[in-house]
Every structure is written in C-alpha cells, then in structure tokens.
Amino acid sequence: MCKKDEGKEKDLLKPKPSDEEKKAAEKAMNLLLQQDRTKKELQDRLYRAGFSEKAATYAMNYVMSFGYIDDLRYASNYISFLSGNRSRKELRYKLMNKGVPPEVIAEAFLEYEDETEQEALRYMLRKRLKGRRLSDMDYQEKNKIVAYLGRKGFSLPAIRSVIKEEE
C-alpha cells in the first residue's frame, strides 16, 4: 500500500462532522471575523448561541487548527493597546476575566515596561484633573485623586512620585 492510500484511509476513518458541528464551526469563524477573542470568550459565545458541548468543542478545535485563537497573541495585543491608559493590575484583572490563564498573562507582560505604567498613571491623573492644577487643590481633593488612582491599580509610591512631578 502506498502513502497516498494510507492518507485516504485515515480520512475515511475520521467521522464526518454533523450539521450542528459544521454550523458551530461556521459561527466560530464569523465571530472571529468580527473581533479577536480568547478561547473562553469564543466558547461562551458558542454556548450562548445554543450549540451543544460536542459541537462547540469541534468548532474550537477547528479554529484552533488554523491558529485563529491564540491567547498569548490576544493578551499581548490587549496590553499593547491599553498599556498607556491602564495599570498593570487592571490589565491583568481584565484579561483574567476574559479567561486568559495567569501564566499566559505573565508571559505577555514581559514586554510591558515600567515607563509605560508611569505614562498610564500620568494619563489617568490628567484625565482626573480635567484641566485643573494640583497646586490649586486642597488636601482632601488630592487625597480623593490618590484614592482613585489606587483603586485603578497603581501603587502608592508611583502615585506620589507622579503627583510630585505634576506639582
């Protein structure tokens, strides 16, 4: 038997996908055409669309076989796009909510620099000040801004240094 015949035999042994599995794969491809998604997001969307677990699994394997789903790529793009506007902590939290595993997030953050965190902090401070100057504010107003930035995930020493720069 030649190698061509062996390949045909393997194709014959594979079960043909059901109509639901084909529709699930098509739905997954359409969802990925709209925007990049994590594995968890795509799987949740397929379940919400009413597909069975078997059909959703088939669709996930189908799109993954082409490399259309890559959580590391997704996390890296997400971080690079929002890094100037968000803290590390907030980015990490949002990625975890999207179903990206912690080890993948850690790997994606290897490219993220501390300078970018400082830029994000300055951006959030200017946004919060709305054109006002820190020197014109009283102690209570400054504390509210520090608390806001802390809730956004920035560290207190970083907040203090940026506030000193701005004053």
Image (tube, rainbow, N blue to C red):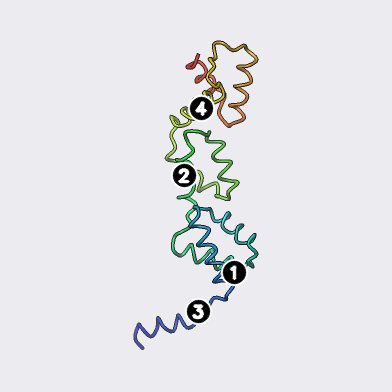
| Tag 1 residue | 55
- Position of residue 63 relative to residue 93, above or below, is below
Secondary structure, mark 3, is loop
**Labels 1 & 4 near each other (Cβ < 8 A):** no
Which of marks 4 and 1 precedes in the sequence?
Answer: 1
Which of marks 3 and 4 precedes in the sequence?
Answer: 3
Crowdedness near tag 3: few (<14), some (14–19) or many (≥20) residues, C-alpha within 10 Å:
few
Nearest to viewer (mark 4 / mark 2): 4
Which of marks 2 and 1 precedes in the sequence?
Answer: 1
The answer to which quarter of the image holds residue 148 is top right
| Tag 2 residue | 108
Which of marks 3 and 1 precedes in the sequence?
Answer: 3
Crowdedness near tag 4: few (<14), some (14–19) or many (≥20) residues, C-alpha within 10 Å:
many
Nearest to viewer (mark 1 / mark 3): 1
Q: Identify which residue, 122 or 30, lies in the foreground.
A: 30
- CA gap, disc 1 and disc 3: 16 Å
Residue 121 circle label: 4
Residue 96 horizontal/vertical position (percent): 58, 46
| Amino acid found under the numbered disc labelled 2 | Ala
Residue 146 horizontal/vertical position (percent): 60, 22
- Position of residue 159 relative to residue 66, above or below, is above
| Residue depicted at x 40% and y 83% | 6
Secondary structure, mark 4, is helix
